[in-house]
Image (cartoon, rainbow, N blue to C red):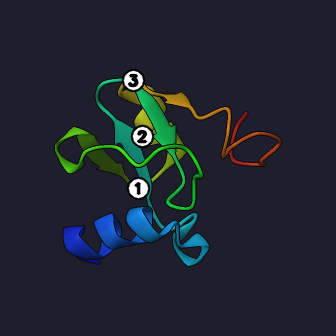
Amino acid sequence: MTEKEKINAIITRNAEYDGKFYYGVKTTRIVCNPSCRARVPKTENILFFDSIDEAIKNSFRPCKICMKNKSEVK
């Protein structure tokens, strides 16, 4: 999957991509699902991760909006 495809999934909040990748926002240190309903960040502030664990290891915390009561958050 290309970076452009991932960005498009975030902008359109496409739930079909949930679990396939996660994105972190550099300015807030929060990691989200592509379908997150929070404000879409600037593309220069986005980092991509293959898993929640990878994001957490890089000092990101799970989003309280899109990961509330989700099985991926421990």
| In the foreground, 35 or 31 | 35
Q: Which three-letter amino acid code belongs to the residue tagged 1?
A: Asp
Q: Which residue is the site of mark 3?
A: 28
- Report if the CB atoms under discs 2 and 1 are less than 8 Å apart: yes
Q: Which residue is the site of mark 1?
A: 50
Name the residue at 46% across, 70% down.
12
| Label 2 to label 1: alpha-carbon separation | 7 Å
Q: Which residue is the site of mark 2?
A: 54
Q: Which three-letter amino acid code belongs to the residue tagged 3?
A: Thr
Name the residue at 69% across, 47% down.
72
Q: Name the image quarter holding the N terminus.
A: bottom left
| Of the image marks 1 and 3, the number of the one nearer the N terminus | 3
- Report if the CB atoms under discs 3 and 2 are less than 8 Å apart: no
Q: Secondary structure at mark 1?
A: loop
| In the foreground, 9 or 62 | 9
Q: Name the image quarter holding the C terminus.
A: top right
Q: Disc 3 or disc 2, which is closer to the eye?
A: 3
| Label 3 to label 2: alpha-carbon separation | 17 Å
Q: Which three-letter amino acid code belongs to the residue tagged 2?
A: Glu
Q: Disc 1 or disc 3, which is closer to the eye?
A: 3
